[in-house]
Image (cartoon, rainbow, N blue to C red):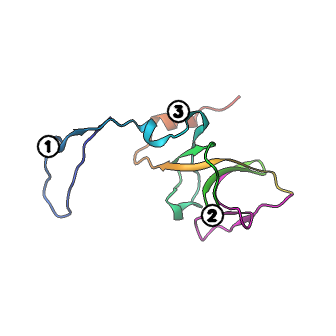
């Protein structure tokens, strides 16, 4: 992957050619984003409950099953048959939202609950991705 740093200040009428500071770094997105390939899956966020931590509707979530879950980590969990992305409060056994419009949810002994993994990265696409659109149209079964 080639990295082209572009520095631009507000109020300028143009900026230097990106090729002027061209640098090629030995960097791959897989290496940058995924620490444990065999234990990592990718999901897509839905809704606005995690905006306070910078996860917005449609963002890509990189979820690692190998990482030890810590208190107040952002996780993906199966809560009563529904996949959710929330902050885990291990001390109080709650799922927390990062939006004041959404209430926290207690995890009781009557709930079906399993942590699927820790969200280690999130990615925002500023244009619709044809790959994501194709994946959304694929129905299991």
Q: Measure the C-alpha gap from mark 2 to mark 1.
A: 44 Å
Membership of 103 in magenta stretch: yes
Residue at the spot x=14%, y=43% of the render?
20
**Chain part drawn in magenta:** 84-109
Residue labelled with disc 1: 20
Location of the C terminus by quadrant is top right
Answer left or right for 26 relative to 138: left
| CB atoms of marks 2 and 3 within 8 Å | no
In the rendered view of the protein, which quadrant contains the N terminus?
top left
Residue identifier under label 2: 97
Find numbered disc 3 in the image and state the secondary structure of the residue it sits on: helix
Q: Residue at x 59, y 61 (%)?
A: 49
Q: Quadrant of residue 12?
A: bottom left
Name the spot of residue 90 as percent of width and height, x first.
Answer: 70, 62
Q: Quadrant of residue 48?
A: bottom right
Q: Is residue 56 above or below residue 61?
A: below
What kind of element bears circle 2?
A: loop
Q: Residues within 10 Å of mark 1 (few under 14, many from 20)?
A: few
Secondary structure under tag 1 reads helix
Disc assigned to residue 134? 3
């Amino acid at each position: 992957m080639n990295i082209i740093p572009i520095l631009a200040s507000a109020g300028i009428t143009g900026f230097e050619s990106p090729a002027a500071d061209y640098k090629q770094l030995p960097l791959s997105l897989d290496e940058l984003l995924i620490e444990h390939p065999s234990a990592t899956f990718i999901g897509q966020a839905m809704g606005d409950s995690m905006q306070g931590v910078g996860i917005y509707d449609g963002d890509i979530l990189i979820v690692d099953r190998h990482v030890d879950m810590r208190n107040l980590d952002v996780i993906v969990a199966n809560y009563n048959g529904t996949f959710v992305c929330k902050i885990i409060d291990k001390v109080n056994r709650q799922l927390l939202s990062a939006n004041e419009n959404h209430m926290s949810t207690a995890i009781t002994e009557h709930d079906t609950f399993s942590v699927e993994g820790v969200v280690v990265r999130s990615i925002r696409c500023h244009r619709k991705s044809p790959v994501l659109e194709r994946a959304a149209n694929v129905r299991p079964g």
